[in-house]
Image (cartoon, rainbow, N blue to C red):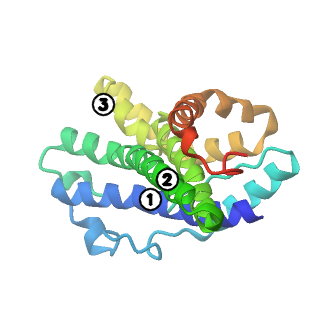
Amino acid sequence: MTDFLLVLPVLLFSVVAHEYAHAWTAYRQGDPTALMLGRLTLNPLPHIDPMMSVIFPAMLFWLSSLAGHPFTFGAAKPVPVDPRNYRNYRRGDLIVSSAGIVMNLLLALACAAVFVALGVAGGASGGAAGVFKILQRMMFFGIFLNYVLAVFNLVPLPPLDGSHLFYHLLPPALGARYRAIGRFGFLVLLVTFMVPALSGVWNVLLWPADMASQLTFSAIGGFALPGVLR
């Protein structure tokens, strides 16, 4: 439970920043939809979805803890955009769709930098390193979660961001059919999350996030305070 209380604010900020990146780049590409609907903000309230931002992460953490492998995941409400407003449709769609992924990768690197700074500060504080350990543990989760969010959103399954990127690689007719299955994409995601026999699919798909995390911690692990990387 202690770890979940550290994970939740990091997860909420990460998914909100992901959606903010979509809103900001859409506005820069000529679409004011998110701005007019109050979504061009880092204030979490307009972005939070009660189910996917709070209830689902809590349930997933609880169930995975019972299995001995604590893990959680979540999402914010997708930012509404109107690609017809982009100054250049294809370029705008590629930029806006990749913005959230880029944001999560940048956040993972930012968390790594803060992790190192906290390690240095905590080591210099001697016996008063308790608060530095807590904050460093949060950055530990921030690195891993942001890598997971980036790789997860790259999966080319509608409505994930990767589906927009993949769409532009397809011939127009095939691309239209691919977009048409988008209304079933969320259902497919739920089934793969909830059916134990299919959960192994995500172990494979999210392998790059695991590898990126391992490489990052191998580089910065020497700055970890005692007990942080348990």
Which residue is nearer to you in this view: 179 or 32? 32
Q: Count up the numbered dots.
A: 3
Residue 212 as seen in the image, left or right of residue 62: left
**Residue hosting label 1:** 78
Which residue is nearer to you in this view: 161 or 102? 102
Q: Quadrant of the N terminus?
A: bottom right
| Structural crowding at the residue carrying mark 3, measured as other residues with C-alpha within 10 Å and reported as few (<14), some (14–19) or many (≥20) | some
Which residue is nearer to you in this view: 60 or 117? 117
Distance of label 2 from label 3 (alpha carbons)? 45 Å
Disc 1 and disc 2 in contact, CB within 8 angstroms: no
Distance of label 1 from label 2 (alpha carbons)? 38 Å
In the rendered structure, which disc, 2 or 3, sits on the residue that comes first in sequence?
Answer: 2
**Residue hosting label 2:** 120
Q: Residue 51, relative to residue 173: is it above or below?
A: below
Query: Amino acid type of disc 2?
Result: Val
Q: Position of residue 63 (x, y in %)?
A: 82, 53
Query: Looking at the image, is mark 1 or mark 2 nearer the viewer?
Result: 2
Distance of label 3 from label 1 (alpha carbons)? 20 Å
